Amino acid sequence: MKNKSERKITKSEYLLAQMKDGKRLTGKQQFQLVCFLSIPAILAQITSIIMQYIDASMVGSLGAEASASIGLVSSSTWLFGGLCGAAAAGFSIQAAHLLGAGKIKEARSVMRQSVLAALIVSLVLVLGGMLIGGKLPEWLGAEKGIQKNASSYFLIFIASIPLIQLNRLAGSMLQCSGDMRTPGMLNIGMCIMDVIFNGLLIFPSRTVEIAGAVLHLPGAGLGVTGAALGTALAELVTAVLMMTSLCVRSPVFRLKRKESWKLKKNCIKKAVRLAVPIGWENVMMCGAMIATTRIVAPLGAIAIAANSFAITAESLCYMPGYGIGDAAATLTGQSLGAGRLELTKKFSKIAVWIGIFIMSVTGAAMFFAAPFMMSLLTPNREIQELGIQVLRIEVFAEPMYGASIVASGALRGAGDTFIPSMMNFMSIWFVRLPLALLLSRSTGLVGVWIAMCVELCFRGIIFLLRLRQSFTNITNKEKRKK
């Protein structure tokens, strides 16, 4: 008779176990494993963008200035969110390698240390964000009319950084153990909660008619501030559930009595070595986005809002790439930890080609769906028309953008973080920004997006070359060991 505590393992868990045990995986099984791990990760990534859609579309109904106030600081919020992700990656990459090598006890130790270290990092980020929050909109060159709301939105986001950090950490730890489903489902739940909380906090109390029935909906009428508070509350509930899944329910990481939480020098040094390049990459990329915002800001509220909404709309196209990149990081990390070098290369190639294909399809869909996507975000016709125009430019960059995203994930899983971070830095700062500055003078926001398209194609090419070189280097290193 089966023990009630026994859990039926999923197909992905079975295939991961086969890989770690040194069993042969057919081409079909390799493809299946990439897909099994990608789908929940894609859902998790898409839901984060849907939350931005929710904030943007709800606030969009309040007018162009309200929309611009969120759009102005969006690149700054991504910067801080990216640093949370970097801190999480520094530990989850280690855990993936240890799990692949069958060192469960050591992986569990890394997880416990990561919780303490990540909380320390998040508190430092909160302090830094609070120091700059009041002046940030002014530094970005915003008009006086949107500075107050922009600052309020940013400061509330900053206060929720510890929650974001716990979500990122718990999600990445569950993913590196092969559990992509739990983070995906919890992130979907976070989107639903975001809709509910935003509806209550953004708008004032109102009466609506649905199917002939008149309903009275309560509301706080906080506008832009309500959007930030609604998202923070959704993050709070999800953080509790995510950490419960990691520390109580995870068969790999659930806490046990008398386990040490002491930070160990070797683990922290490895985390820093892995996380700093990723953090640097996020700083440079988001810093470039902030610089882009500075280029766009003088073009007026319509251009700021259109740029922000177009970025949000485009995100639905490239978020599948990030989901596949997360799966690639898990598979390369575990297969490399298990000493399956050839399998590591095959997983990377399969993931990259899936990423290119899916983002080609989503890019084509975006070309035709651009008017509908923009209409969901704002009722303003001027903003819609400009947003549609720039979105259709970006379609041509999606395949190579997909290649760069997935290749970056595969390299991250293999522990190769420094060179890719420098490649991102060089590409965005020395290709995109100079072109954007030059073209914006003659063609406005359209020129900024042409520059982005050119740079993303260039980035995809250099990341494919780096992926090939990185695994050649690993192969040569293994040969020298033998």
Image (cartoon, rainbow, N blue to C red):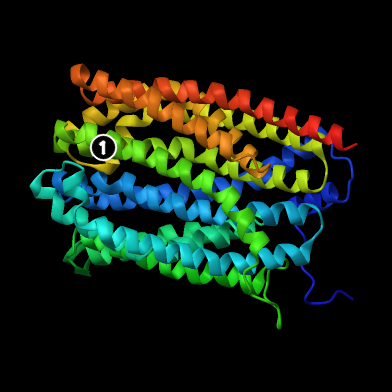
Q: Residue furthest bottom?
A: 257
Q: Element type at marker 1?
A: helix
Q: Is residue 129 above or below residue 401?
A: below
Return the x and y of residue 236 as percentages of the image width and height. 42, 69
Work out which quarter of the rendered image holds the C terminus and state it. top right
Give the camera-side residue of 379 and 301.
Answer: 301
Return the x and y of residue 132 as percentages of the image width and height. 25, 56
Q: Quadrant of residue 375?
A: top left
Return the x and y of residue 124 as percentages of the image width and height. 40, 63
Name the residue that disc number 1 marks: 293
In the image, taking residue 342 as reference, residue 265 lies left or right, namely left
Return the x and y of residue 225 as percentages of the image width and height. 22, 61
Q: Residue at x 70, y 53 (%)?
A: 96
Work out which quarter of the rendered image holds the N terminus and state it. bottom right
Label 1 crowd bin: few (<14), some (14–19), many (20+), radius 10 Å: many
Q: Residue at x 32, y 20 (%)?
A: 435
Q: Quadrant of residue 115?
A: bottom right
In the image, taking residue 137 as reference, residue 84 lies left or right, namely right
Q: Quadrant of residue 352?
A: top right
Give the camera-side residue of 322 and 87.
Answer: 87
Q: Residue at x 20, y 23 (%)?
A: 444
Give the camera-side residue of 434 and 9.
Answer: 434
Q: Residue at x 21, y 60 (%)?
A: 152
Q: Is residue 334 above or below residue 95?
A: above
